[in-house]
Image (tube, rainbow, N blue to C red):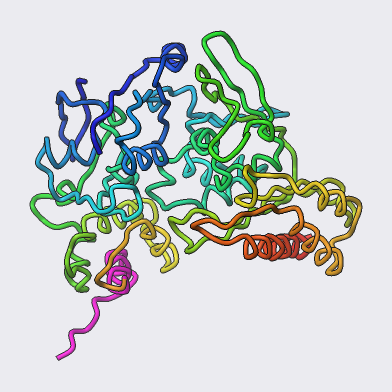
């Protein structure tokens, strides 16, 4: 079917099967491979993208369901080639180990901060509860979101 | 996951016509059906009827007497609805505990009902709210009380040519709760859940409905416990007796998520917690 939607701020017109997963549409047809496939069934959050600003699992959305909508992927949250505040905070706190969960984590955090610029630690945990990380133990990720929200100063470097 | 064919109706009429056709399965948020297709695609090749764009099914409306929820209303919509917070606190609690942010942004109340799981979290609240489902086909509408909708795990009275087009209940000031236990707090299916709606007048329970999830082939009402509680004050003794009674109304099984003896015991524990919360805020 003919699809027309806004992707990272730009209009996209593309012919794709309506039954194709949004995840495959992004990765295979549009070469946006920042969005990762983990479990493929909505449990890990690695494929998180923003649909009209709200985080969703792109493995559980079909191409036919995004016609006329707005999608933001990890590739779309920089501005003027500058990392977003959340991305910088992830870098500063050392929240990235293998990195596979990072795009999804960052997008969930961006969506949270857009709605709630000063979230509590519990609100951060709840907002990220659909994103699994097997490396970090989450603490540095929570810290990154607090840092991006301005709740916390950058942790001192141990010398 | 292999590709599936989709049907993209422009309006409800087209959707109802298409629903009657062979091998057509309706998809709302897709959080159940796309997982099933992922897990066992080889055995299933439905044509998916995309309901996403049927704007008329996305609304929550309230009149003086009645609240009507469109089947495409998402769990996130329920969580943030002020009218539902006021008149259906159990439903709001259930919607906010299920899945994750990503799942709640897509999962719909109509999908949760149509999927027919005895562990579906919005169902016990809808039992205690006395919800009635509007089922529509190209030929017309019928109304089925939610308690008559389920016939077994994953089985409902929804006909091949029908869609759920509204979930309605009377607007009333009830107190209530929805409590559940699952392996972890996020992204886990309930092992056991308890919902209640209670009207207390002059310290006594004037009306009460209790529903139990994941402890029988369908969600069930705990009518013996309800009868026991009617007219009583919520004292510690009464709450303890109700917890003992309600355990005996559960008919759980052993499965991958839990075992029957534990589920039965936990029905009593959740009942106690819920009634205590009502008594404390009386």
Q: Residue furthest top?
A: B139
Q: Nearer the viewer, residue B194 or A150?
A: B194
Q: Most extreme residue toward the bottom, as rendered?
A: A159
Image quarter hosting the C terminus of chain B: bottom right
Residue B74: x %, y % from top left: 47, 39
**Residue A102 is a magenta residue:** no
**Residue A33 position (above or below residue B145):** below
Residue B62 visible: no
Residue B73, visible in the rendered structure: yes
Which x, y percent locates residue A140?
A: 28, 73
Q: Is residue A57 above or below residue B42?
A: below
Q: Considering only vertical position in the picture, is B3 above or below B22? A: below
Magenta part of the chain: A138-159
The quarter of the image holding the N terminus of chain B is: top left
User: In the image, what residue occupies the spot 67% across and 25% down?
Assistant: B144
Q: In which image quadrant can residue A70 be found?
A: top left
Q: Is residue B77 left or right of residue B254?
A: left
- Taking the image as shown, residue A152 lies to the left or right of residue B54, namely left
Asked if the magenta segment contains residue A140, the reply would be: yes
In the displayed structure, would residue A158 be above or below residue A25?
below
Taking depth in this image into account, of B124 and A50 the one nearest to the observer is B124
Q: Which is more toward the observer, B254 or A15? A: B254
On the rendered structure, is B212 left or right of B14? right
- Residue B137 locus on image (x, y percent): 54, 14
Q: Residue at x 39, y 55 (%)?
A: A116
Identity of the residue drawn at 31% across and 64% down: A149
State the image coordinates of residue A113 (x, y, percent, origin top left): 33, 56
Q: How many marks?
A: 0
């Amino acid at each position: 079917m003919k699809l027309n939607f806004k992707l990272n701020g730009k209009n996209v017109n593309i012919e794709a099967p309506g039954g194709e997963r949004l995840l495959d549409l992004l990765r295979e047809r549009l070469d946006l491979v920042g969005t990762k496939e983990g479990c493929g069934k909505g449990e890990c959050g690695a494929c998180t993208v923003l649909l009209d600003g709200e985080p969703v699992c792109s493995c559980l959305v079909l191409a036919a369901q995004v016609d006329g909508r707005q999608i933001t992927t990890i590739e779309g949250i920089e501005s003027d080639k500058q990392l977003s505040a959340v991305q910088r905070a992830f870098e500063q706190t050392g929240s990235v180990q293998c990195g596979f969960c990072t795009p999804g984590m960052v997008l969930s955090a961006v969506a949270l901060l857009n709605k709630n610029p000063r979230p509590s630690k519990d609100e951060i945990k709840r907002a990220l509860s659909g994103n699994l990380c097997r490396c970090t133990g989450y603490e540095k990720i929570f810290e990154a979101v607090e840092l991006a929200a301005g709740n916390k100063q950058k942790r001192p470097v141990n010398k | 996951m292999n590709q599936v064919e989709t049907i993209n109706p422009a309006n409800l009429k087209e959707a109802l016509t298409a629903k009657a056709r062979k091998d057509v399965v309706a998809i709302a948020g897709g959080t159940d059906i796309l997982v099933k297709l992922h897990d066992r695609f080889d055995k299933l090749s439905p044509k998916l009827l995309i309901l996403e764009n049927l704007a008329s099914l996305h609304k929550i409306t309230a009149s003086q007497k009645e609240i009507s929820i469109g089947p495409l209303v998402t769990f996130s919509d329920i969580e943030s609805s002020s009218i539902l917070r006021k008149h259906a606190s159990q439903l709001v609690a259930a919607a906010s505990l299920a899945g994750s942010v990503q799942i709640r942004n897509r999962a719909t109340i109509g999908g949760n009902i149509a999927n027919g799981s005895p562990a579906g979290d919005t169902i016990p609240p809808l039992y205690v709210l006395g919800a009635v489902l509007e089922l529509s086909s190209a030929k017309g509408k019928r109304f089925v009380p939610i308690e008559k909708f389920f016939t077994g795990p994953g089985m409902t009275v929804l006909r091949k040519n029908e869609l759920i087009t509204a979930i309605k209940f009377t607007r009333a000031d009830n107190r209530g709760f929805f409590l559940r236990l699952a392996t972890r707090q996020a992204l886990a299916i309930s092992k056991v859940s308890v919902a209640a709606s209670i009207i207390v007048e002059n310290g006594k329970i004037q009306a009460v409905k209790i529903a139990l999830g994941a402890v029988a082939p369908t969600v069930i009402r705990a009518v013996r416990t309800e009868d026991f509680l009617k007219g009583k004050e919520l004292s510690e003794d009464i709450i303890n007796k109700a917890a003992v009674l309600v355990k005996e109304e559960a008919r759980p099984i052993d499965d991958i998520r839990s075992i029957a003896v534990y589920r039965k015991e936990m029905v009593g524990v959740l009942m106690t917690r819920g009634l205590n919360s009502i008594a404390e805020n009386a």
